[in-house]
Amino acid sequence: MCKFFSELKRREVIRVAIAYLLVAGVLVAIWTPHIAVAQQPPTVLVTGSSRGMGLELTKQYAAKGWKVIATCRTPITADALNVLAEEYSRIAIEELDVTDHAEIEALAKRYADVPIDVLINNAGIFGPVAMQTLEELDYDTFVDVMAVNVYGPLKMSQSFADNVVASEQKKIVTITSGLGSMALTDKNGGYYFYRISKAGANIVGRALAADLRERGVLIGLFNPGIVETEFGRDTGYAGLRLKPDVAVGALIGLIDELDAENAATMFNYDGTRMPW
């Protein structure tokens, strides 16, 4: 009889042990993917990273612990960017001219398996102010401005759309400008090429939002204001300019808050909606 009860007790212990093992296995199966995701930092790709806002975007995202794919036309001469990459091991510098579509396609192929949480179309040019007045319209300048400010963001968004879709955050951001607003243009003229290019970038963003909405992609169109950079000085604006760290800090805040409710809408750096 004692032997019988001893056998029952042994079997019960085995059953309980098996039950605990099964529960532990289920918990491991549930939590392991989440742990793996949590350990992977998000990735941002920034165009025009060698100076100005692009350099500051690279710096601030790297400081936040993100992986940064920092692109520029001539990495070998991008001294400040190279110094930054020495400080932050998660910065990868890539050569890229956004007007060279073959180069964009080659980079996209190289990063085909890399999810990109945020693609920031930051590269842009203003063009000589004197060559885009009603008195003097240099159409070669017009071609250059459109190639960088409109065709570039469109080609980048097309080529890296799958990378963005594969990510957690799924965001494509293009730097726009109040000069691209038709509603604000009645106050003053000039700056023809830059205005047209930023209005074009805005409509590209709206069309991308429509095409990529079902894939969960959010489009951001943000105006950083007039920033104390070489680009900002090219505008000829004589008023107060924002410091790059302040402007980029505000921009990153807008990107963090980008959701389905405010996507594909032009926002100023201070969080106010801008008229089209």
Image: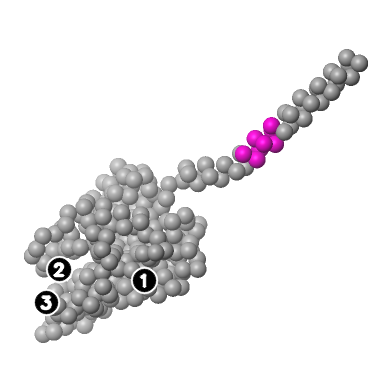
Residue 205 is situated, as x and y percent measured from the top left of the image, at 36, 71
Residue 145 is situated, as x and y percent measured from the top left of the image, at 25, 74
Hey, which quadrant is residue 183 in on the image? Answer: bottom left
Residue found 28% across the figure and 47% down from its top: 84
Q: Specify the segment rendered in magenta.
A: 20-27
Give the vertical position of 150 relative to 78 (above or below): below
Q: Earlier in the sequence, mark 3 or mark 1?
A: 3
What amino acid is labelled 3 in the image? Ala
Residue 250: give its label: none
Secondary-structure class at tag 1 = helix
Residue 130: give its label: 3
For residue 43, side relative to residue 187 (left or right)? right
Q: Is residue 23 magenta?
A: yes
Q: Which quarter of the image is occupied by the C terminus?
A: bottom left
Secondary-structure class at tag 3 = helix
Foreground: 110 or 263?
Answer: 263
Mark 2 against mark 3, which lies toward the viewer? Answer: 2
Please tell me whether the stretch drawn in magenta is mainly helix, strand or loop.
helix
Residue 205: give its label: 1
Q: Which quarter of the image is occupied by the N terminus?
A: top right
Q: CA distance from mark 3 to mark 1?
A: 28 Å
Residue 86 is situated, as x and y percent measured from the top left of the image, at 30, 43
Q: CA distance from mark 2 to mark 1?
A: 23 Å
Label 2, on which residue? 235
What amino acid is labelled 2 in the image? Thr
Residue 104 visible here = no
Residue found 53% across the figure and 45% down from its top: 34
